[in-house]
Amino acid sequence: METRRPPAGPAALDDLSKAIVEQLQEDGRRSYAAIGKAVGLSEAAVRQRVQRLTDSGVVQIVAVTDPLQVGFRRQAMIGLRCEGDLEDVADALAELPEVDYVVITAGGFDLLVEVVCEDDDHLLEVLNQKIRGLPGVRTTETFVYLRLRKQLYNWGTR
């Protein structure tokens, strides 16, 4: 998966593509026929549009799991203060298998990174051996998740 993204900005989506995205956000398993019925397109037209949306990187269709139920008992958000090229550090972090989210920020931290680990020992290993040793990382601050209360991906389109 490519880690660098184009500069932020709204994608040029027409109203039908936005409606398709919203249908998929409600239920990523919804059939092309059901989506077509909801948005007024044929199944084939929906299939083509979804393919274009996925090929262009506008949409990913994935299974979102509860980490606890699949053996990952420790999640954390890690704030990093860095020196040098932030994109180089962000790209190196994005390559780590335990990292599922990397964002360059403004404010108290240069980067925020979410990690999913098997347990506290695994988190310590990731912090000590993988993250803190990266060139450009000056300091880290770890925010351990105690309980996940909300995680949704259905914010719609603009």
Image (cartoon, rainbow, N blue to C red):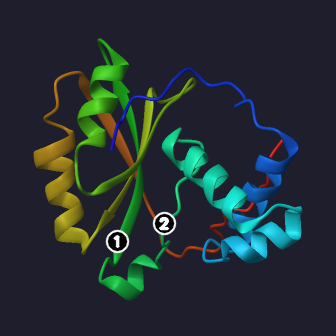
Which of the labelled discs sits on residue 62, or is there none? 2
Q: Residue at x 28, y 22 (%)?
A: 88
Q: Residue at x 63, y 60 (%)?
A: 47
Q: Position of residue 86 (x, y in %)?
A: 36, 20
Query: Does 96 sit above or below residue 87?
Result: below
Which of the labelled discs sits on residue 74, or is there none? 1
Q: How many marks?
A: 2
Front residue of 14 and 64:
14
Task: Name the quadrant of the N terminus.
Answer: top left
| Kind of residue sitting beneath label 2 | Val
Q: Position of residue 35 (x, y in %)?
A: 77, 69
Task: Name the quadrant of the C terminus.
Answer: top right
Front residue of 151 and 120:
151
Q: Residue at x 36, y 35 (%)?
A: 3
User: For residue 23, which quarter of the picture?
Assistant: bottom right
Q: Secondary structure at mark 1?
A: strand
User: For residue 98, which quarter of the picture?
Assistant: bottom left
Query: Does 17 sit above or below residue 135?
Result: below
| Kind of residue sitting beneath label 1 | Arg
Q: Secondary structure at mark 2?
A: loop
Asked if residue 130 lies left or right of residue 78, the reply is left
Q: Which-is-in-front pick, marks 1 and 2?
A: 2
Q: Position of residue 108 (x, y in %)?
A: 52, 28
Query: Does 22 sit above or below residue 67?
Result: above
